Amino acid sequence: MSNILNKVKLPYLLLLPGFLFLFTFFILPIVNLAQTSTQTPIAGGDTGQYEQTLQFSNYITAFTENKEQFARSFVFALCATILALAIAYPLAYAIAFKAGKLKNFLLVLVVAPFFVSFLLRTIAWKQILGEEGFVVPTLRNIGIIGQSTTLTSTSFAVVMGMTYNFLPFMTLPLYASLERIDPRTMEASGDLYANGITTFRKVTLPLSMPGVVAGTLLTFIPAAGDYVNAAILGSPNTKMIGNVIESRYFKIVDYPTAAALSFTLMAAILILVTLYIRKAGTEELV
Amino acid sequence: MADVSSATHGDLRLTRITKTYGDFTAVNDLSLTIPEGSFFALLGPSGCGKTTTLRMIAGLEEPTVGSIHLGATDITTKRPYQRPINTVFQNYALFPHLTIFENIAFGLRRRGIKDVTADVNKVLDLVELPHLAQRKPTQLSGGQQQRIALARAIVNRPALLLLDEPLGALDLKLRRQMQIELKWIQREVGLTFVHVTHDQEEAMTMADTIAVMNEGEIEQMGSPADLYDNPGTAFVANFLGQSNLIKGRIEGTDGDNLVVDLFGQKISMPKNRSHAVDKSMYAGIRPEKFRISLVGTPTRGNTLTGGRIEDVSYIGVSTQYQVLMPWGQEVMVFEQNDDGVPPFDKGDEVVISWEPNFTFALRGDDDVEAGLEVNPEELDEE
Amino acid sequence: MNKQKDATIPTIPAKARLSRWFGRNLIRIYAVFGFTYLFIPVLYTFAFSFNDSGKSNLIWKGFTLDNWKNPCGAPEVCAALGNSIKIGLLATVFSTILGTMIAFAIGRYAFKGRSSSNLLIFLPMATPEIVLGASLLSLFLVFHINPGFWPTVIAHVMFCISFVVVTVKARIASLDPRLEQAAMDLYANELETFRRVTLPLVAPGIAGAALLAFSLSFDDFIITNFNSGTLKTFPEFVYTSAARGIPAQANVIGSAMFILALLIVIAGQFVGRRVKVSK
C-alpha cells in the first residue's frame, strides 16, 4: 500500500483540498475585486450594473476623494498599535517571568475577554465612557476635563477601543517570544555589570524582537481596515477608510470605487509591512 | 498486521553497503557478518558511520548500494515493521501518551498477539521494574526509562536487537552497572545484540566481537583482546587504549622474528604481528607492557637505552611515567603500584624493556595521529 | 556544648527593603492593573445582564434574574445565537480538517513549492478583514449567489484555515520523529503509526486549533456582515440593535459564553495536569 502513496506525491494530495478552497475563495475573489475596480456604471442602467472599461482613474478618484479617511486610518492604527505595544509588553513580561505556576491561567485570562462578543465589549466601553457611565462625571468633578467635553464620539474613544480590542493579538506573540528567552542570559547580563534597565535594553528587548514584529503586524493590519470601533465609538468626523468602503457597498452602491479603495488599502498595507519587515529583519513569520 | 516471519533468523550479513547523502559518503563499501547469538559492538568516533549502519540494519534508512541478509532472507528493501529486528533508541523514544505497560506491549499488539500480559510482566521482571507498569514515561528516571526501552524491544524476541548508544545519557556509576546487566541479559535471553558506541571501554567490556569504524569503513574487526593486543592500524591502536608508536626500519629476519632498527637501537618482534608492507614501519608497544629499570640493572627482552624520566603521575592503582628517549620522543609507561612507593623520580636516567611478543608493527605510511584527537565538540554526539 | 550567641546579625534597613520589594514587584502590580483594565467591559456586561431594563439596557434600573431565567425572551436573540453556533461548528469542522491536512503537508515533507505554500497561508492573515469580506461578496454577486448562510460558512472557513495551519504546524514541529521510527521498529506500518502515535500526540494541537477557529468564527463581524445578507449572527444582532437598544438578554448570552469558554479551558488544564500530579 505504501508503494501507492508514493512519498513524493503525498504532500501534494494533502494540500490539494485546502489549497483548492483557498484558491477559489481567496485568490479568485481578490482577482475579481481587481477587475471590478476598473469598471464604470453602465449609462442608463440600473444601480449595481457595471461594465469593464479599464478605468484606472477610479483609483485616483477614490484616493483623492478619501485621502482624509486614509490618513486617519493609518494614524489611528499606528496610535493603537503603539499603545497596545506599550500596554501589552509589560503584561506579557509579567506573565512570562513573574507568574510562576499561574502562567497558563493568566494566559487564559488574557484571551478570555475574547469570548464576550467584541461588539458587546465595544458597546460596553461606549456606555462606560458615555454620559451615563461613571468615568466622565468623575473626571468632570475632579476637573480633568471640561463640562462640555465628551469622551465618546471622539478620536480618543476610537483609538482607545481599537487598542483594547487588539490587545490579545499583541500580547500573545510577545509572550511567546519572551517565554523562549533563557532567564540565564539575563542573569549573565547582570553578572557582567549591567543593571536592570540596561539588561532590558541590550538583552531582553533584542531577543523579544520577533514577538514585537509579529504582534505589531497582527495589530496594525486589522486595525487599519477596521470600521466597527469608529462606527460605535466615533462620529462622522472620525470616519476611517473601512467605514467608507462599507458604505460604498451597502449604502451608496458603488462597487468599482469600493473595490478600488479596498485595493489601495491592501497595497498601502503591503508596502508598509514589507518595509517594516525588511527593517526589522524577521524571516519566519508563519 | 505486520508481516514478520518469526522463522527468519540466522547471521546478519551486510554486503558491500554504501550510503551517500548528496556528495557526502557516510558508509563506504562496508561488508560485515554478525554471527547469531553474539554480542557485537560497532565502535568508532562521532561521524564514523556506525549509527547510519545501525539504522540501515533496522530499516530506518535504505542503503544506496549493497544488500542486507538475515540468514537466507534478503531484507534490504523491507520496511522496519517487516523486519524481526528491534531498536533501543539513544533517547529511548518511549511513547509519552502510553503507560509503561502499553509501551512494552506495543510491538506485541501490532503483531496481532491478543494476550500480552504474561510476556509483558515477564520482561518487566527481567529488568526489575514490575511496579512501574501503570506509570507514564515522563514519571521515570533516566535509568528506568532506559531499562523500559530495552524491555520494550526484548519482549518481541527479535532475531536481532540493536542498541544505539543506549547508555550515553546515564551517569558513570549507573552506566557501569547497566553494562554488566546488559551483558547478563544478552546471555540469559540468547538474542543477538548489536551495540553502537563511541566508548571503547564500554565496547571492550560488553562485546564478544568489536568492529572499529572510521570514516565510513571498518578499520579492524575481532575480539576485544585481538584488537587490543594486535591492532592493525594506528587508528585502532590509538582509539582502543593508548599506544606508543616508534618509527623504525625492518633490517632483516631471525627465524620467526623480525629484526627492527629504532633510531639506532635494535629490537626483535614476531613476524606474524607485523602489518608493515615494506621496510618502513612503526613499532607499537602498549604503555603497561614497558618495564623501567635504572641504568646498569640487567633487563630481559627488548631494551631501549638513553631514557630520562620527564614526568611522574601517581594515579593510585598505577603510576604513569613520561620517558624522554634520545631521539626526542616522549614514551608513556604505566607501572602497577604493587609494591608500595613508585620507585622512580623525575630526572632519573633509565632504560625501558619489554617482552618482544608484545610488540606490534604498523605500516610506515600510517597516520600516527589517527584516533588520537578527541574533539570536544564531538563528545556530545546527537 | 558551649556556643557563643551571635552578635548582632546585620539587618537591611526598612527603606531599602521596601524599595527592593517594589523593584521586584512593580511589574506584578502593573499586571494587576492591566488585567483589571482587560476585564472592565466584561464585568460591565456581566453586571448589566442583571439589569431590569426592558428594551433599552443603558441605565441601571434594578437587579433581576429574569433575564437569566429567560435568555430567549427578546426577539431574535436566540435565533442569532443559533446561527452563530451553527455557522461556527460547520466552519470549525471544515477549516480544521483542511488546515490540519495542510499543516501536515508543510510541516512534514520537503517538497517543491513549500515556501510558496507558506506564503499562501500567510496572505489571508495579512489581509484586512474588510478586503476579505468585500472581495468574497463581489465574487458571490458575479455568480449570482445571494449572501446568506452558506456563503457565510464559506467565508469563515476561508479565514480560519490559516490560523489552524499555524497552530497545528507548531505542534507538529515539536514532535520527536524518533517516536514514529520507534513505532515502525515495533511493527506498526505507516497507517498504524499515524493512528497510534502521530495523531494522539498532535491531537492537543488540533483541539487548540479547533477551539481557536470556533472563537474566531463566533466573534467575527466584518466578514460576516458582508456575506450574511438577511441572516443575522449574534455579533450582527448586537450591532444592529445598538441603535434601538440592546436587550439585556444579549448580555446574558455574552456572559454565558464567557463563563462556558473559561470553564472548558480550565477543565482542559486540569485534565492535562492530572497526569503530572501522580509523579
Image (spheres, coloured by chain):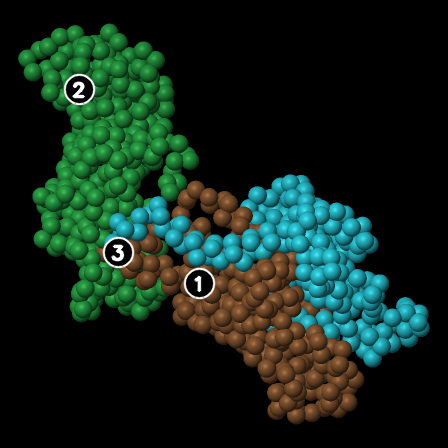
Name the one closer to the observer, A173 or C145: C145
- Label 1: chain letter: C
Residue C36 visible in the displayed image: no
Residue C123 visible in the displayed image: yes
Name the one closer to the observer, A230 or C58: A230
Give the cyan chain's letter.
A
Q: In this view, does C140 lie to the left or right of B254?
A: right
Name the one closer to the observer, A175 or C238: C238
Residues at marks 1 and 3 on the same chain: yes
Give the green chain's letter.
B
Q: From the image, which quarter does the N terminus of chain B lie in? A: bottom left
Q: In this view, does C14 lie to the left or right of C222?
A: right
State the residue position of label 2.
B275
**Crowd rating for badge 1 (residues with CA inside 10 Å; few <14, some 14–19, many 20+):** some
Please tell me the numbered disc located at residue C97: 1
Judging from the image, what secondary structure is the residue with disc 1 in? helix
Q: Nearer the viewer, mark 1 or mark 2?
A: 1
Q: Chain C is drawn in which colour?
A: brown
State the residue position of label 3.
C189
Residues at marks 2 and 3 on the same chain: no
Q: Which of marks 1 and 3 is nearer the N terminus?
A: 1
- Whether label 2 touches label 3, CB < 8 Å: no
In the image, residue B206 above or below residue C209: above
Q: Report, in whole angstroms, how far the alpha carbon at label 2 lies from the one at label 3.
A: 48 Å
Q: Report, in whole angstroms, how far the alpha carbon at label 1 lies from the one at label 2.
A: 66 Å
